[in-house]
Every structure is written in structure tokens, then in C-alpha cells.
Amino acid sequence: MSTHYFNSLMLLLITSSWLFVPSMGQSNNRVTMNNDQKLRQFSGLLDNAGINAGTALTVFAPTSDALEKWRNSDPDRFQKYMQQPEFFPNLKHLLEWHLVTEGAYLLNEIFDGSRERMENSQGNITINQQVKTIDNVPSTAFVQPDVATAEGVLHALSEVIIPPFLGADMISQLLNDRSDVFALTNMANLALHVKLEDRINAMYDNGFTFLVPPNRRFNRAEIDIPKMLSPEMYNYTRDFVLCHMIVDSYHEAQVFAINEDKPRGEEQFLVISELGTHLWITTTEDMLRFQAQEVLVPDLPSNNGIFHIMDYPLFPPYTSDFAFFTAIATNHDTSDCFRFFTQCILTSEEIAASVNSTVTVFCPTREAFAFFNNEDFNRLLEPIWYRHACEFLFNHMTSPAMTREELVAKAPSHITMLNGATYQLRQTENQPRLKNGNEQGRSQFGDLIALDGYLHTIDTAITPTAVSRSVYDQSNSNPDFSLLVENIDFVDLTDIIDRDLPLTLLAPDNRAFRRIEFGTLDGGEIINKHLFRGLFFCDVLANMTSTGIASVNGFTHAIEVRGENMEHVWVGGAYIYKCDILARNGVLHYIDRVIGEDYETVPPTISPAPTITPQPTTSEAPTGAPVPLFAEEPGDNSVPISLPPVLPPTNKNDIATADDMPDQGSSGVRSFPPLIFMSLLSVAGLVVFL
């Protein structure tokens, strides 16, 4: 490049009116302020906040007198900003507001009428050309203007510039769309609708945090805002807003500082929202999350605290929600526990409503399921076994809601779960412990507060009889069915009924067997008439009156539904007086007679399948049973008759398979769940179709 060309270019740049060029030997912004006694305090505040003054081309530096004037005019805010770490973002934004990044402006350039604003890292300082002010500061406050520095220009001010957002309440900021990228009016309007603006805008000792999803995230979450604003949704909308509110300021730097010394995988802690429920705050690498949802824009300050712009709305949490959140936000992995809520198509809210009480949920951790039978676990999560999965879930829930401290205070005692099972309640130091034989589930973590109760983790899954006992075991455990078991053993069907799956057994009780006599040659045939491939719950059977049901040995039994509400089911002339006893490999029903054996009884008539699924799973044992054949009950030796045994089938092909039966799936009917789950179907809105 020629010397003439270089000199001409430099002359052009220097003489250009739009470029301010400081002298080569001048100090930078920080040194200039530190060399001036009246600006040294402002420079120190910038250093303490980690703000690099060298990024500014124009610095508006309040003098020590200006800072003292601010202290006297607003002592409460001054003290909070200067002394409380909860208000660090507010102070940081205020300081950065004084650093203009778009250009170096002399005083006459600021008020020459050519511009309305000056950009800084937090927004724009507004210039009022008529009254000669920048935001709240008049031009007369420029006590030492146009100080040249190595980076640009500095103006010493006798007043502190107060950013507009630090003078406005939080609701006003949301309505005025403080963010240039996101519209935030949905949350503001919901808060106004449920009259929470006073609580959101109130001054708190340690600040306030509001979690605000932008309008577009409401659309992504498929939240119907007009419906949320309707009168019938008032209470839910109020809960929705409250679960986004936290008294105390939890800004990004503070949260990372809290989690800094925690072991890897435990970078989280709990706070309580204004709804009264727990809220996880988690840091993962450089990401801040609340209730497992990411923060898009952190630390937007208002006059009483901060708000974070969230990636997704939060929802009023129930214990089943915590089974999901905990797995994501903590090192306590409860994801497998959450899968059982999903498999049951039920929330803990619906379960709590069905028992009209709050609930306590004992969630086995993923480590606990590692010691659980893998075959059983996978089977429970298959669609056709969903009732057994619900039984497993209810086996880990009780009512009412109890903290771990309250559970420890009750020990030693017994605790009854929602499925009716009773276990020993023990304690290990300050940890409650559930004991079921050799199984002992200890709760080392918990007390998560939800709207419907508490969630505690346990380190061992507690196995219900629906999972631990086979169809054969369930029959054998009831002394009223000893003759059925004796006959099953006698004809060598024990292994089939104990291991094959899925099976349905119609189980005649001892009284039914004592009303008949049969020979050994008929024993296997008779038992097989009561055995079916597949899961046929009572409501499934009730919708098969037009087809009947085929047993494993090919006999088709007529099905009759009677009662005022179509609640009583007969199969092959036998009345089912107790439905849906769940077992590891199927289900059994108690019946009042042996199918296919003649004695006086009222035969079934042909009735259409019910148009709705009948509800009862329990019914009274029949009082008008057929008259016994014996005046007195014979001894046990009369059944079966002691004759030479007949060899059992040599292989399973001798027993009818599912291919020999009508298509069970064609009925499209879900069966009744045991106990509580029946009433839950109506709560959950699980309509059963024919």
C-alpha cells in the first residue's frame, strides 16, 4: 500500500463525523474510573458483578454522590441490591444499563435530535429530545461529560439511571412484552383472571421468582387459554399459576453456586412453590431446569424479583408426576415406577379421587427393579396384563398421605395398601421400611409434596400375590378349594395350571364338589372344562353371551348375564360369585357348581350381551343354591373316587389351544379391575365398548 493512499484513508476516517476516535495514549474505561475518586465506587460495583467496562463505547458513570442520592431516595431497594445475593441479577442489569454498546456518543450527539434510543446489552435507553433526558436522568445531571477513553467516551452523572423494568411491576412487564423474542401475555392474563397479581407484584424479603412460558409454548402444550379463562376452570387455573410462583429469588448464578459443591448426579434441590407443592431446581452442565423443564432466558429482573422464560409450562404436580420428574431431575431414577402409571392409564389424582383421600406412594427405584424378576416385570408391562400392573401399582400405594417421619412414628405396626394387602411397617433409624416376608423396602428418599399426597422411593419392590402366586397357588391358598386342588393334582394338571399362561380358571368350591360324584376316568376331562386359554375377566365374559366360551378341551359353554343391572354372570350353568382373582399366570373366578355335571339347578337362558360393561367384581355367594345330592356331606375320600388313575396327556397338544377358541380380541372389552380399579374406570373415563 502506498504512503499517499494510507495517509488519505486515515484522513478520511478521522474527519468522518460519525466516528469518535480517542487519543492513542488515553486510559481504558476501567482505569479512567479508578483514577477518578468520585467514579471509583461505580467501577468497583462493575468489578464485583463481573462486568467488563471495556465492552462499552459510551459509559454513563454515576458518581459516589449519585449512588448516595439513590440510597436516600430508595433505601430498601438499595440495601437489597447491594447486600443480598438474591438480587444480584437486578443490580447487574442496572449496572449494565449504564454501558452503551452501539456507539461512542458525545453529549451534543446524544441530544442533537437525531436519535431516540441508545442500545445496551439489556435493551435501549430512551432519549427524550424535547425535555433532554435519558430515561429518568436529565441532561443537567451530566456533571463531567465527554471524557475520552481508549474504548470510547465516558460521562459522569449526578443521578443513577433506573431501567424502566426495575421501576415496573412484574405483571406490567409481561403485558408489555419485555422480551423482544417471546410474547408473555398468556401467563399475565391467567394471573389477572385468578386475581394473583398482588401476590406476584408484592415485595418479599428475599425476592420472588416467576416461571413464565411464552405464548407459543402454551400452543405446543395444547393448553386452551379461553377454556382456562372460563369460570369452571377457575380453581385449576389458579393452581396452574401458583405452581409457577416461588417466593425467594432463584437466579441462574445462585442456583449453580448452590449445586457447585454437590457430587455429580446430585446437582439439584427442592423448593416449595406457592401452590404448596415441591419443585425441583436442577443444573446439568450449563442448563438450568425447573421441574425438569429448561429455562430459555434466565434472570429477567423486575422491581421485586426475577422471572425466567421457560421452554414449557409446568402443571400442578401429583405424585404420579413426581415419578416422572424425579427420574429426570435427580439421581433417584423412578422411571420404571412411572411406567406402571402409564400402563394403568391412570394418574395418582384419579386414584386418590376414587378412594376420596390423599395417598402415599412408595415408588421402587430402577435399582430396586433390577432385583425384581425380569420375566414378571416385562409381562406386567404388556397390554393384556394391564390389570395385573394396576394391582402391582396399588400394592405400593396407601392412604392417607403420610410423611416418612409420620410413617416412622407409626412403626412397628401394619400398613394396608390400596389393593387390600397388609404388610409390616418397620423402621431403620429414621427410615420407614415395608416388610413382606423376605422383601424389605426401605425409603431413603422422599417426602415429595404433591397435590394428592406424598411420594417416597423404596429400594425393593413389594410383590403382590397377583404377581407371586400362580392360578394353582391362589387355589391352593384357600382351604375352601382344597378338593379342586386335590383333583388337579390327581389328574396331573398341576404343572399346566401352575406355569402355563395366560390362563383363566373357573374354580368350583368344596361345596360344589360335594354335590357330585364322578369316576377317575372323568377327572381330567372335568377339570379341563373349567380351564381356558387367555385372560377372561368377568366383564369380558359378560360380553360373550352370543358366542359362549370354549374350554381347553373343546367344550363350548353358554354364558348368561342376569340381574337388574346385568351384574351376575353364569358360565356353563355355574354362577360366578367372586370375580377376577388375579394370579401370576392368569385369573380365576369362584363358581358354585362343577360345570357339566348334572344336578338340580336352573339352566341358563339365552340373553343378549350387555350394552355396557357391568361394574361389580364382588357379589354375595348364592343363597338359593341347588339342593345337595347328599343329606349329609360325605367325607373327603368320596371325591375323587379311589380308582386306578388315568394317565395324563403326553403333551400339550392334547389340550385345546387358543386357535380352537373364538377370537377373544374381537369383543373389544376391558375387564373389571380388582377392588379399587373398578371404580377408577369411570373416574378415568375408560369407556368400555362392546
Image (cartoon, helix red, strand yellow):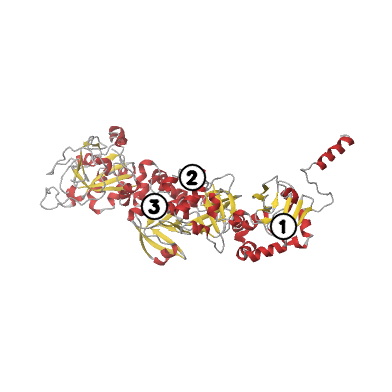
Q: Nearer the viewer, residue 252 or 583?
A: 252
Picture coordinates of residue 3, whole percent (x, y): 89, 36
Picture coordinates of residue 23, whole percent (x, y): 83, 49
Secondary structure type for disc 2: helix
CA–CA distance in space, label 3 to label 1: 63 Å
Q: Is residue 179 left or right of residue 580?
A: right
Give the residue at mark 3: 349
CA–CA distance in space, label 3 to label 2: 23 Å
> In the rendered structure, are the residues bearing label 3 and label 2 in contact, judged by CB atoms less than 8 Å apart?
no
Q: Nearer the viewer, residue 25 or 377?
A: 25
Find residue 646 and report its image quarter.
Answer: top left
Picture coordinates of residue 170, whole percent (x, y): 54, 55
Q: Residues within 10 Å of mark 1 (few under 14, many from 20)?
A: few
> In the rendered structure, are the residues bearing label 1 and label 2 in contact, judged by CB atoms less than 8 Å apart?
no
From this viewpoint, is residue 313 visible?
no
Instruction: Report the residue at 36% width, 43% height from top.
Output: 385
Disc number at residue 674? Answer: none
The N terminus, quarter of image:
top right
- Report the mark closest to the observer, 1 or 2: 1
Q: Extreme top residue here?
A: 659
Instruction: Report the residue at 34% width, 45% height from top.
Output: 685
Give the residue at mark 2: 218
Looking at the rendered structure, the kind of residue marked 2 is Phe
CA–CA distance in space, label 1 to label 2: 47 Å
Sequence-earlier tag: 1 or 2:
1
Give the residue at mark 1: 140
Q: Extreme front residue here?
A: 130
Q: Nearer the viewer, residue 368 or 207?
A: 207
